[in-house]
């Protein structure tokens, strides 16, 4: 019986040679890109927030989403437009933090959570800028 189990395990590992325990996605945050803008979102837990803190030096804008009562929020839609009104990015944040690498400039950041919209103008230049968005639940 143990020999049969061992054979199935070997076949399984041969069938999936790129398998590793780190592939479970638990803390692996994936950088994405839209219209030439790199971004990553997450922060649902201490491990993800730690990973994002380590990546902050690669980005120049950090958006944070929370309730007025203090709990973090996710599934926030974010639309960023340049001064001419052209849409730069339109994403839904996977967690309470969204890091973006935008060209220097001034942008309108429009966020929506449960049909309630919050808009803010942000200036991005050197260094990391942070904008907080709060909703009353």
Image: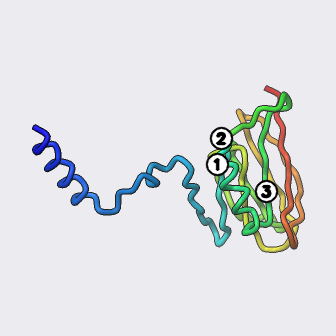
Among the two numbered marks 3 and 2 on one chain, the one whose residue lies closer to the N terminus: 2
> Callout 3: 10 Å neighbours few (<14), some, many (20+)?
some
Per the image, the residue denoted by label 3 is 62
What is the CA distance from the residue labelled 3 to the residue labelled 1? 15 Å
Element type at mark 3? strand
**Residue drawn where x is 49% and y is 50% of the image:** 25
x%, y% of residue 9?
21, 49
Residue contact between numbered discs 3 and 2, judged by CB atoms under 8 Å:
no
Q: For this view, does 97 lie left or right of residue 16? A: right
From mark 2 to mark 1, how far is it between C-alphas?
6 Å
Secondary structure beneath dot 2 equals loop
Query: Which quarter of the image is occupied by the C terminus?
Result: top right
Task: Please state which of residues 94 and 87 is positioned toward the viewer in this rendering.
Answer: 94
Neighbor class of circle 2 (other Cα within 10 Å; few <14, some 14-19, many 20+) is few
Residue 36 location in percent, x, y? 65, 72
Q: Please give the residue where the numbered disc 2 appears in the rendered image.
A: 45
Residue 48 disc label: 1
Viewer-side label of 3, 2: 2
Q: Is residue 22 left or right of residue 40?
A: left
Q: Which quadrant of the structure image shows residue 102? A: bottom right
Crowding near the residue tagged with mark 1, few <14, some 14–19, many ≥20 C-alpha atoms within 10 Å:
some
Is 125 drawn above or below residue 41 in the view shown?
below
Q: Is residue 134 left or right of residue 6?
A: right
Q: Position of residue 115 (x, y in %)?
A: 72, 34
Give the Cα separation between the discs numbered 3 and 2.
Answer: 17 Å
In the picture, which quadrant includes the N terminus? top left
Position of 20 compared to 84: left or right?
left
Q: Are marks 2 and 1 in contact (CB under 8 Å)?
A: yes
């Amino acid at each position: 019986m143990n020999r049969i189990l061992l054979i199935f395990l070997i076949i399984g590992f041969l069938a999936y040679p790129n398998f590793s325990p780190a592939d479970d996605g638990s803390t692996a945050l994936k950088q994405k890109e839209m219209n030439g803008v790199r971004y990553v979102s997450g922060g649902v837990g201490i491990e993800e927030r730690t990973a994002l803190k380590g990546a902050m030096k690669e980005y120049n804008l950090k958006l944070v989403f929370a309730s007025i009562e203090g709990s973090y929020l996710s599934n926030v839609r974010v639309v960023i437009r340049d001064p001419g009104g052209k849409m730069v990015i339109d994403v839904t944040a996977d967690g309470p933090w969204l890091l973006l690498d935008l060209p220097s400039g001034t942008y309108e950041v429009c966020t929506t959570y449960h049909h309630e919209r919050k808009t803010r103008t942000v200036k991005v230049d050197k260094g990391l800028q942070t904008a907080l968005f709060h909703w009353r639940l």
